[in-house]
Amino acid sequence: MRRIVAFVHSAIGRHLAWLFRVTWHHPRATLAGSLLALCLAITSISGIRFEADIFKLFPTDRGALRLFLDTLEWTGSAGEAYLLLEGNRERLPAEAEVLAARLRALRVDGEPALRSVSYRVVESADLPDFAAFVGRAVTLPHLFLSPDQADEFTNRLDASRMDAALRRATAELAAGGGVGSRDLVAADPLALRELILPRLQSASQALDLDPESPYFLSRDGQLLVMIAEPARPVQDMEFARKLVAGINEARAAVGPGVSVSCAGAHLSAVIDEAVMKRNILACIASSLAVVLGLFFMTYRRVLPTILIPVIIAFGTVMALGTAGLLLPSVHIISFAFTALIIGLGTDYSIHLYDRYRTERSAGRNTEESLRLAVVDTGHGVFTAATTTAFPFLALVISDVRALSELGLLVGLGVLYSLYATFFFLPPLLIFAERRAPDVRHNPLPSLGLARLWRLTQRGPRTIAFISLATAAGLTLTAFSISFEGDLKNLQPRHSEAFLTQERIERHLSISPRQMVVAVEGSDLSDVMRKGGEVAALAEGYRQRREVVAITWLGSVMNGAGEQQQVLERLQKRSAVREAGRELGLALERADFDAAMFPEAVSGLGRLSSAGPVPTAEAVALLRGSPLGSMVDRFLVERNGRWHLLLTLHYRGDAFPQERFLAQLEAVAPGARATGPDLISRQLAESVRGSFLEGFAIGGVLILFLLVVHFESLAGIAASLLPVVAGVISMLGLMAVTGMKINFMNAMVLVTILGMGSDYGLHVYHRLREGDGSEAGDRYVQAGRAVLLSALTTVAGFGSLAFTDYGAMSSIGWATNFGIGATAFFALVSLPAFLGLRRSRKPAGLSTKE
């Protein structure tokens, strides 16, 4: 092992010496080769396909997320747009009609933008078909009535009740109710639909609406929901942008007193994309401004300052170009994280240039100063870059695409930025020196670090105690941090789509949370039977108030057993046996022509000998009606297999999901379940597993590189102290402030793992040189670079803390906590611990430590 470590250490030294020789003797050839590589990378980037579908960031081949995506595809609800009209109840229907007409006329690229727009239980164009369905449904009461409604249905077949119903029908026709009203009377002259439709209407709606209203109206009458189905999927972002623009134009024409807000996948995608772009651009702009400002204020040189964005751009372009050769596509969110390169890639320029300026200020010539910067400080920079890049690159093996792509892009970006610094900075400094050979190199500002050094050496015990106490306290609080799996909380918090969706859930949802259970098989009757058993299991939870409601196809129609119970109650009554003849007589008494009501008369006449309706026939009846979309929400046939969906509505933690899932496996083996909680758990496990693998591999590589660099336990411990304390402090501070780990800010952990070891590495690398007489000066030189690196990182990604995008904001705060704590432990705690150690060794830190 010692031979391997010595060989790698020597190889890195020889490699850095070669880099110095090449850039010193052949600066133009070095730049020309770099530009050639850049052109090839740009060519590769031109063929990259960028994606925006957030679900493609995670494993979708199994578990709750797979079923969730399947249900979105089966039911078509993945891309629905919701428009919420709020205002005076009397005005809402009229304004909805005007808005619906505008939306139906909306075109994108010459084609209809929306497949359908609905805001009524039954649209006007569907009234004749709806009346025909009603006429058939009232002659099949055993299919739609619950057993306890059988007596009321029978009572309505009494002769006196028939006469009263026909008098009401006559009044409705005389009032001129329109074509729809005449069709309904013709199909159902006895108004038996009043017993059947409430069940159909309530089960056909995914929202908690007013059952008495023909519109999708809230119970308080203040909200009317309009549901539109876009013609193209949300993944087509160009279409989504044009659709949102068209919707905005259409709703702008709504009259005063009625407001219209929107929600849905397309609107959310457009808003999220715009917010993310705005935040990323602001992050890049602020980061560059702060980086360049701090660099120039510290070093007072224009050319090295201008070089920084060149190095960052080179690293980013080369990383994307390489990814274009290795990946079929890149997700836009993964690409957004390449902004990390701004903070990470800048560090290497700061460290090398700071060492160069320090040596020039000490009187060394250009060649010697540059050699020390590239070969000596460069060794620390090389180790720091690789310890940062390898934890990211270790994520490439993850099956979570978000982590795999991010790890590849950022890891490669760090390495390319490192070599861009080695290839670009020396030629620039050579050019600057030749251009102005007599320029004066004044001592660099200490930025208060000289005073901080004296403080850490005068009271090392006190600082060490405070550091350990702080770390211990934050360690305890870190254990209380939890995982944020609700993707909704990562959206822009004040966007229209987010706020509208919240209002829909608050005012119109049956319950805040849902679990969908899928019972699947090739035989429809068997699938429905198993579905009934699952529904019976869920009913027990509803009776214990652990579940609010259960909706499935069985909520709409009865199974064979329930049908038989209803038929037994009906067929033992004489009014049912004589229903057809009595209806004919009642029609004659009311001066109606019985020949105009053939289905009603014959249908009630067959009721006395009717049997249970077969499942396939019942499904076909419903699917062929204007309520057919309701069936598609519950039952889907794909490739010869039936998929029956049951939705359990529940609130909070009242529903014991683990117990239910265990019982579900016993009742219906092979049944699948999905829902926000289950998806969150699956994603959390995937991310957690990938991070543990990445941390393990990255940690081993970091440890090996530190062993190679320092060849001692003391150096390794000094490098790991800030990173361990920084990660603990970040998690502890997040827990104290109520933050949670989520899919986005978890990436900061990888950043801290690499950068934290960098900070300690640079400080210890300089302090171990020489005897102890110039330790303060060396600390100031290394500490200045570390401080500037931390400030540039916080200024970049830390500025995201103040954005409205929950995901980005969490990244910003995590960065501020993690980088701030890591810099504190590297610049304050580490020198204090080293001071304690040095006080026990008269000779101070040796060069071999």
Image (spheres, rainbow, N blue to C red):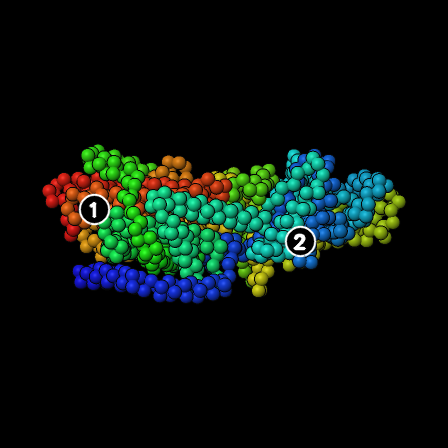
| Residue at the disc numbered 1 | 767
Provide the secondary structure element on which disc 1 rests.
Answer: helix
Q: Position of residue 525 (x, y in %)?
A: 59, 58
Disc 2 target residue: 114
Left or right: residue 32 compared with residue 524: left
Residue displayed at 54% across by 40% down: 494
Please state which amino acid type lies under the numbered disc 1: Leu
Classify the position of the N terminus by image quarter: bottom left
The percent position of residue 725, horizontal first and vertical second, equals 29, 43
Instruction: Indicate the position of residue 136 as horizontal and vertical percent values.
Output: 74, 52
Q: Nearer the viewer, residue 655 or 101?
A: 101
Q: Is residue 482 above or below residue 339?
A: above
Name the secondary structure under disc 2. Answer: strand
- Residue type for callout 2: Leu
> Crowdedness of circle 2 by 10 Å Cα count: few (<14), some, many (20+)?
many
Q: What is the spatial separation of the Cα atoms under label 2 and label 1, in whole angstroms?
A: 68 Å
